Amino acid sequence: MAFLVALSSCEARQDEPLVSPIVNSTASKPQASELAALIDQGNSLMDTKQFAEAVEAYGRALESDPANLDVRVDRGTCYRALGQPEKALAEYAKALHQNPNHVNVNRNSGVVLATDLGRNAEAVVYLARYLELVPAATDREQIQLWIEQLKKTNK
């Protein structure tokens, strides 16, 4: 909520502003440029395999913009790289709650469930959904073969 402070007298000195600066209750939240910088920092840290630091940067970005699904997915990917698949899956679940049709979330959820947690039946659901969402996926044949293998090992 922004507000202005009125002058206490009718005359103002020339070196004083007529109104005080606008006070914004969201001043503690990063501005758009600061948010972009946090995301860039997280991306750079992730690219250089500094996953713990990237998790922190992405976390600060998500405090300001919790609806940013790409940041949430990247944070999950960092958790997985740190050997924390349950935390990765928790990030992916939050993203899926916001958008069940997010392509990378479906694919990554399937990968973590199958590769890291051995939850093959659940993995098949997400991987199949990924293929539904991206009929021309470049990894389509590989994912289809993997789904068939997962189904066989789940019997």
Image (cartoon, rainbow, N blue to C red):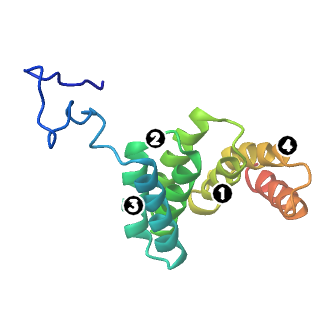
Residue at image position (64%, 35%) is: 99
Residue type of the residue flagged with mark 1: Ala
* Sooner in the amino-acid sequence: mark 4 or mark 3: 3
Q: Contact, CB < 8 Å: mark 2 with mark 3?
A: no
Mark 4 touches mark 2? (CB < 8 Å)? no
Provide residue 39's location: percent of width, then percent of height.
Answer: 48, 59
- Other-residue count near label 2 (Cα within 10 Å), few / some / many at <14 / 14–19 / ≥20: some
What percent of the width, then of the height, locates residue 150?
A: 76, 55
Q: Label 4, label 1: how many angstroms apart (C-alpha)? A: 18 Å
Res 55 label = none
Q: What secondary structure is marked by label 4?
A: helix
What secondary structure is found at the residue carrying circle 2?
A: loop
Q: Earlier in the sequence, mark 2 or mark 1?
A: 2
Residues packed near mark 3 inside 10 Å, few (<14), some (14 to 19) or many (20 plus): many
User: Toward the viewer: 22 or 110?
Assistant: 22
Pick whichever of labels 1 and 3 is earlier in the sequence: 3
Cα distance between the residues tagged 2 and 3: 13 Å
The residue beneath circle 4 is 132
N-terminal-most mark, 4 or 1 = 1
Q: Position of residue 53 (x, y in %)?
A: 37, 69
